[in-house]
Amino acid sequence: MIGTITALLISYWFYKSAEATGKNPLSSAVVGFLSYLIPCVVWTFAVTPGLRDAVEHNPGTLSGLFVNYAYILVGVACAVGVKYMHFKQAES
């Protein structure tokens, strides 16, 4: 649920940034959504299983919370990076 809300907020952020800069808002929102979703899916399938295995040996720690929500941090970090590359103004 938190991941879905984050994806919608990032799409909205890209949409509003596109309106402000004169770019196509719909395609920018899709770029924002995918720049969040793709790293989240890759992290979930590639990294999370190994982390969950490690947490099973030491349950009840804060690392269990990190394992469950780390994909959101990775997705947001990637979306922020893509946003600054996508909306970077041409240098004169």
Image (cartoon, helix red, strand yellow):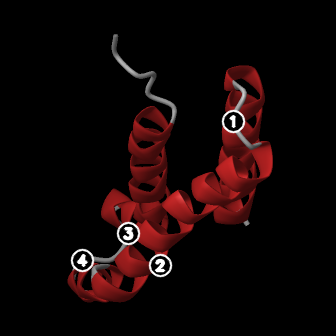
In this view, the mark in front (1 or 2): 1
Amino acid carrying mark 1 in the image = Lys
Amino acid carrying mark 3 in the image = Val
The residue that mark 1 highlights is 23
Label 4: few (<14), some or many (≥20) within 10 Å? few
> In which quadrant of the rendered image does the C terminus lie?
top left
Expressed as whole percent of the image width and height from the top left, the position of residue 35 reads 50, 59
The residue that mark 2 highlights is 41
Decide which of 5, 88 is in the foreground and name it. Answer: 88
Amino acid carrying mark 2 in the image = Val
Residue located farthest toward the front when viewing the structure as drawn: 92
In this view, the mark in front (3 or 4): 3
Mark 4, secondary structure of its residue: loop
Q: Is residue 22 above or below residue 68?
A: above
- Reading the chain from its start, which is encountered first: label 3 or label 2? 2
Q: Which quadrant would residue 50 be assigned to in this image?
A: bottom left
* Inter-mark Cα distance, 1 to 2: 27 Å
Expressed as whole percent of the image width and height from the top left, the position of residue 59 reads 33, 77
The answer to whether the residue labelled 2 contacts the one labelled 4, judged by CB atoms less than 8 Å apart, is no
Mark 2, secondary structure of its residue: helix
Q: Residue 67's mark? A: 3
Residue positioned 38% across, 88% down in the render:
45
Mark 3, secondary structure of its residue: helix
Residue located farthest toward the top when viewing the structure as drawn: 92
